[in-house]
Amino acid sequence: MRKRLKATKGAGVIEIVTDFRADTYRTIYTVSSPGVIFPLHAFKKKSRRGSATSKADLDLIRRRYQLALEICQNLSTELTHLIAEYDIAMKAYEARLILRAYSS
C-alpha cells in the first residue's frame, strides 16, 4: 500500500507499507524533482499495536528530507552553472568556426 506520510504535513513524503511473513515493513521516500527519488528511511515495524511511526523514525525522516531538499537545490544550482559554461563554450566554438571561415 502506498500513501502520503501524514506526519510530514504534506511535504511530498510517501510511505509504502508491505506485509511479509507476519511482519510489516515501511519504506519512506520523496520525489523532490522530476526523475529524482530519494529513499529517506526503510524499517521493520516493531510495535504490534497501533500504526503510528515512532518519534525517532519521524525525526530521522524529517532530517533526511531536509537534506534531500538541499541536495536538489545544490544540483539545480550546479546544473545552471554547467549550462551557462556550456553555452559560453559553444559560442566560443562558433566564433572560431566563423573566424576560420573568414580567414580562408
Image (cartoon, rainbow, N blue to C red):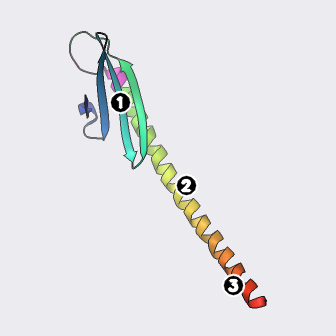
Counting from the top left corner in percent of width and height, residue 12 is at 30, 41
First of labels 1, 3 by sequence position? 1
Counting from the top left corner in percent of width and height, residue 31 is at 37, 42
In the image, 71 versus 36, the foreground residue is: 36
Q: Which secondary structure lies at badge 3?
A: helix
Viewer-nearest of discs 2 and 1: 1
Q: CA distance from mark 3 to mark 2?
A: 30 Å
The residue to which callout 2 is attached is: 78
Magenta residue span: 51-58
In the image, 89 versus 78, the foreground residue is: 89
* Residue 28: in magenta span: no
The amino acid sitting under disc 3 is Ile
The residue to which callout 1 is attached is: 28
Counting from the top left corner in percent of width and height, residue 80 is at 52, 60
The amino acid sitting under disc 1 is Ile
- Seen at 53% across and 56% down, the residue is 79
Q: Which secondary structure lies at badge 1?
A: strand
**Up/down of 61 relative to 86, above or below:** above
The amino acid sitting under disc 2 is Glu
Q: Quadrant of residue 100?
A: bottom right
The residue to which callout 3 is attached is: 98
First of labels 2, 1 by sequence position? 1
Q: Quadrant of the C terminus?
A: bottom right
Q: Quadrant of the N terminus?
A: top left
